[in-house]
Every structure is written in C-alpha cells, then in structure tokens.
Image: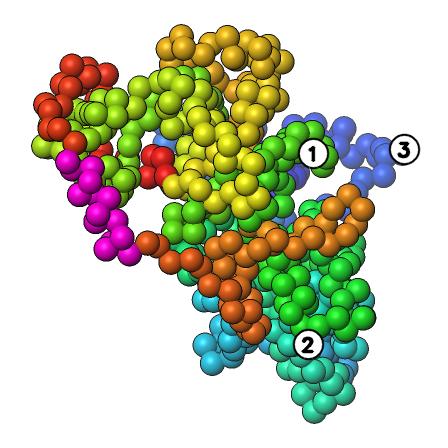
Amino acid sequence: MGAPRSAAFWVAAGLMIAIAEPGRASEPAPDLALPELPAVEVSVEDVSTHPPSIRPASVWPYIAWAESPKIVVDVVRSEPPRRRVADVPAPDLPEAPVVFTVADRLAALLAARLSDAQFQLSPKLSRKDREAIAAFYAVGAFKPLWVDSEGWSAAGRSIIATLKAAEAEGLAPGDYPTPALDAKAGDAATALAEADLKLSAAAVLYARDARGARVDPGRLSRLITPTLELPSGDGVLTALASAKDPGAALAAFNPPHAGYRVLKAKLAEVRASQLGSRLEGDILANMERWRWLPAEMGKRHVWVNVPEYRLRLIRDGRAIHEARVIVGKPETPTPIFSDEMEHAIVNPSWYVPPSIFHNEFGGSAAYAASRGYQVVRTRDGGISVRQPPGERNALGFVKFMFPNQHAVYLHDTPNRKLFGAEKRAFSHGCVRLDQPFRFGEFVLGSEWTEARLRSLIGKGERTIRLPDKIPVHITYFTLTVDDKGELRQVADLYAVNNKVRVALGLPSDGTRVAAAAPKKQIAPLRQARRTAPERAPPYRAAARAPAHYDPFYYWWVTR
C-alpha cells in the first residue's frame, strides 16, 4: 500500500472513531504530539443501500462499517501544483576560454596522419609494415611513443642514439634518418605527431635490417634458403614500448651470436687502423650472413661452414666435436640453410639421381648394371637406379637425415683419401663426413657408441631415431676467428661472399664461381660407357624399389 493511501486510511479511521465514540474523541492525549497531517479532501457517502457486487472497487478498502449510519469515507490527498523544469531559470555561467594543449591534439593528429594516404612514413616500408604500425597506434588510443609536449621524450632520445650508432653494427645510419623536430614551430603539435610516427618507422626499418631484411638471399641463389626471422612492425613497437631502455631493446635485434660480436669488434679495429676497404667489405658481408641464422641456434646444434670444409658439434656455445667434411663442387654447390636432424640410417641404399645417371652413367642402364647397380623400370616407363648397401656404396655405411627442400644430408663415403686434400669440394651437394661413427655417438645418444654402430655394418638397413631433434645449420663464412682471437680468411668457394658485397652496395672483389664442364667434354665419356655390353635390366630388384618413386624427387636425393 502506497504512502498517500496509507495516510488516507488512518485519517478515515480516526473520523470513524470520532463518529462512533464522541466522548473518547474529545479526550486530549496529553503525552502524544500528533504530527501535522497533510491537507486532504474528505467525502462521505451512504453506501448501505449498495449491493456488495456494485460497491466501488476504488473505495472498498477504506470502508468502515457501523450499525448506523452506514457510510464510506474516501480520502484524496491534495498536492500543490508542480513547477515545470522549463520555468526554472539557469544560473549564469562564468566566462572562461577553452584551451586545447599540444598533448590534447596529438592523439587526433596521429590518427589523422596514419589515415592519410598521402602521408609517407618511409619509402622503404612495405604496405604490410605501415598497416602494422597504424594498428599498433590504434590499439594504444593513438598515444605518442617518443615525444611529449616539449619535444623528444627520454625514450625517443634512447631510440635516436641507437639509430645513430648503426654503423658500428655494420648497418648504414642514412637508412634510418632521425626526423627533425622543432617543438616551438608554428604548429608544434603537427610537427610532434609527424616526428613520432617517422621515428617509429625508422626503428622498425632498423630492427628488420638487423635481422637480415637488407639482402634477399633467394635472389643470390636458389640454393641459399635461410628462414629469416623478420619482425613485424607492431612486434617491433611492442618490444620497444614495453622496454625500460628502448634503445638497448632496438640494438638487441642484431645477432646475439659470439661470431657476430667478434666480427663487430674486428670491424671497429679495421676502421680505426684504416687497413683498407677490401677487408672492411669482407667483414660487413660476413656480418650480414650472421643475420640469416636464427637468433636461437639451439643449445646443441650442428654447424657446417662450407668454404672452411669443417663441421662442428656445438653444445652450450662450445665445440665438443670437430670433423673435416667434403662439400659440393662449384657446379653442384652445397645449399645454405637450416633444418633439424631426425634420424640416421646405417647400411643405406643409394638411389642415383637422374642428373648423375645421365651425366656420369651416360644414361645407359646396361652400364649401370655392369657396375653392380640395380635397375628398375618404373610404371611411367622411366628407370630407377639403386646401389645396394655395402662398402662400395656412395653413401658409405651411414647417413644422417634432416629432411629439407634440397634433399641433402650428411653421410659417410667409401673414398676416404679425399679428406687428405686441402680443398675438398668434390660432392654433388651433400656433405660427406669424416669420422661418421664418432659423430653418430654424439648425436644418437649414449647407448649408441661408436663400437655398437660399427657392429651393424653389413646387417641390412637400420633406421635409428635421434632422442631429440638437433638443429643443423649449413653456413657460409669466409672470415672466422680462432681461439687466439686471430682473424682467419678462407677462399670464397662459390663467390657467395662477393655476391653479398655487391648486394650491400660494396665494390665487387672480382671472385667468380668455377663454370661447369661443357657438354662437349662429357660426350666422349658417355660414348665410352655406352660401349659396355647391353644386358637386360635386373627386374628382380623391382620389389626392393620404393613404391613412391618420383624421378623429379630423386633428382635431388643425393648430389
């Protein structure tokens, strides 16, 4: 029951008492101070003659019955008229000017510049990076990163210092211009907003170049296929904005490897002593190739340096095993890339690639059969040539597999005399390994000792899974530093170093790759081999040929 109806009820009840007991009503209540009652209108109606069914519902709850007379009391509260809001005069407001500070305008200006197709952050930024930078600012409500109302913030000055020191990292400071900033210019807010965006663009370019974006390795050769770890624009800004020292965080995008740091120190020495531009250029080209490697090469990994003809097994930053290797000839170079070793095969078979079959077997199935190879006709009419396991097998007694797009691997060889040569570029692309069983003892786990692996020779093919995959990095460095800190330089076997020099805008050193032998020199060899007596291919070997044979795949199986 609402408050007005309750008040009316008690007023009506009091009137009924006064009517029924006049004497009681006149008696004063000495100790009770009655509250002031609201103004009401009272109407009394005799409803004794009304049947219950037609009594007004609106007054029914307030009916008080007596023997005589029968009445109904309806109380209606009177309320003063309400004043309309429109009639209330508004107070006078004090006169005060509205002032928008530079900081108030920066967010709007940043948003406007990023949405303006005519505004250019940097001509070297890709569209994808520009969109990533815009997305980062949008997520942060377009707050500036490097400026405040007075000019460059401490974070901005830290970034600028790293950009100006780019030359020490083998980069070009001119590629990362620091925007001019005059906070007292006519439109200071616009100048600040544009400077903030352009410094972000310069920082993104620096970070990507530090991770290898300056040179596209695939344009140097289809056999140079490292997986570059190029950061996105928003990824760079996220790392810098959350760092206590943004400048140090930006510099950290450069390679963290010890080999890179040594070359950086040597670069400073060469520049200080002015030993010559040729050596400086070689250092810069080698530093650039360190950017092709992943920042984390693996706590334990295999590192092959092709022009050095050397393999090292690294654990916790130190070489625990070294071995001589044979690499690809200049006309069939060993690819440059990284992958993961998964398993080894003892007593492997060798499926002769079509390139070797045509160039070295003269395309003659009879000649291959006369040399002990098993020749199988494939369903499409081609030929698969397989060399069974054994001491004469081209892969030797073991091969170590790290499946990759080039289908190359590490393997043993029956011709061990070649390891005595100083220059060991004799293979078709794979890496032949000296002391393969010693190497296997390191990578296959403690249970696979060198003696146990040798005991498997001649007992059929055996696949052994590595307990943990091991990263394999096939690299190309012509400058290395020995244990004494001395700089050692090796020949540019495939002219990769010179190609990188040219790609960086440095003078060519004149190095060229040895050309492949012309066909007219191969033809007599083919003719001689074709004189071998023809005989039917040994189809009995068909059951041992792989069911998934693909002649285009086996072109690269062993090189």
| Numbered circle sitting on residue 340 | none
In the rendering, at what x and y percent does residue 450 appear? 58, 15
Query: Which residues are drawn in magenta?
Result: 518-531
Measure the C-alpha gap from mark 2 to mark 3: 91 Å
Looking at marks 2 and 3 on the same chain, the residue that comes earlier in the sequence is marked by 3
Residue 106 magenta-highlighted = no
**Would you name the residue on which mark 1 appears?**
319
Q: In which quadrant of the rendered view does residue 534 lie?
A: top left
Measure the C-alpha gap from mark 3 to mark 1: 106 Å
Residue 424 visible in the shown view: yes
| Numbered circle sitting on residue 178 | 2
What secondary structure is marked by label 1? Answer: strand
What kind of residue is marked 3?
Asp
What kind of residue is marked 1?
Ala
Is residue 3 or residue 522 the one in the foreground? 522
In the rendering, at what x and y percent does residue 366 appear? 15, 29
Q: Which residue is drawn at 47% across and 27% down?
A: 412
Q: Which residue is drawn at 35% across and 18% down?
A: 389
What secondary structure is marked by label 3? Answer: loop
Residue 46 visible in the shown view: no
**Would you name the residue on which mark 3 appears?**
31
Q: Nearer the viewer, mark 2 or mark 3?
A: 2
Is residue 265 or residue 6 the one in the foreground? 265
